[in-house]
């Protein structure tokens, strides 16, 4: 938001400053490892590199969420089917 505000005011911002503003604006809990990995052994980073890496990170997170929820649904479905089969095997039709 801050970066966009400055851009809207026609303030000239150097690429390295954009990178610092962007990386420092990320929440520590969710992005600390990402930031450390991104800056590790780098002399400089371009704004385009950082934004591309962030987009890729978010896409991977969303894919992981979709995969996790799909897998959870499959497991739940399998559990329900298994439970129903166990009930049928314990109480066959026609048994007292």
Image: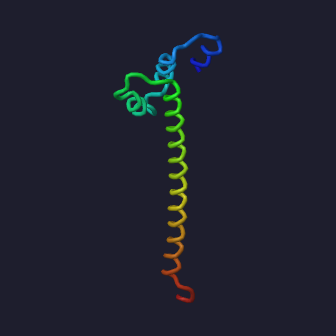
The residue that appears at 46% across and 22% down in the rendered structure is 24
Name the residue nearer the viewer: 40 or 77: 40
Name the residue nearer the viewer: 15 or 19: 15
Residue at the left extreme, as displayed: 41
The residue that appears at 42% across and 29% down in the rendered structure is 35
- The colour style of the image is rainbow
Q: How many numbered circles are shown?
A: 0
The residue that appears at 49% across and 34% down in the rendered structure is 53
Which image quadrant: the N terminus?
Answer: top right
Q: Is residue 93 above or below residue 52?
A: below
Task: Please provide percent x and percent y for residue 90.
Answer: 48, 80
Task: Please provide percent x and percent y for residue 45.
Answer: 44, 24
Q: Is residue 56 above or below residue 20?
A: below
Task: Please provide percent x and percent y for residue 72.
Answer: 51, 56
Q: From the viewer's perspective, tell me whether residue 75 is left or right of residue 4.
A: left
Q: Is residue 57 above or below residue 25?
A: below
Task: Please provide percent x and percent y for residue 94.
Answer: 56, 89
Q: From the viewer's perspective, tell me whether residue 21 is left or right of residue 10.
A: left
Q: Is residue 29 above or below residue 83?
A: above
The residue that appears at 51% across and 82% down in the rendered structure is 91
């Amino acid at each position: 938001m801050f970066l966009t505000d400055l851009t809207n005011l026609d303030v000239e911002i150097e690429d390295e400053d954009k990178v610092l503003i962007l990386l420092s604006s990320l929440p520590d809990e969710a992005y600390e490892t990402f930031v450390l990995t991104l800056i590790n052994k780098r002399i400089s980073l371009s704004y385009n590199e950082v934004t591309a890496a962030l987009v890729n990170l978010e896409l991977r997170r969303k894919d992981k969420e979709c995969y996790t929820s799909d897998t959870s649904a499959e497991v739940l479905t399998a559990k329900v089917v298994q439970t129903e089969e166990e009930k049928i095997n314990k109480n066959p039709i026609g048994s007292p």
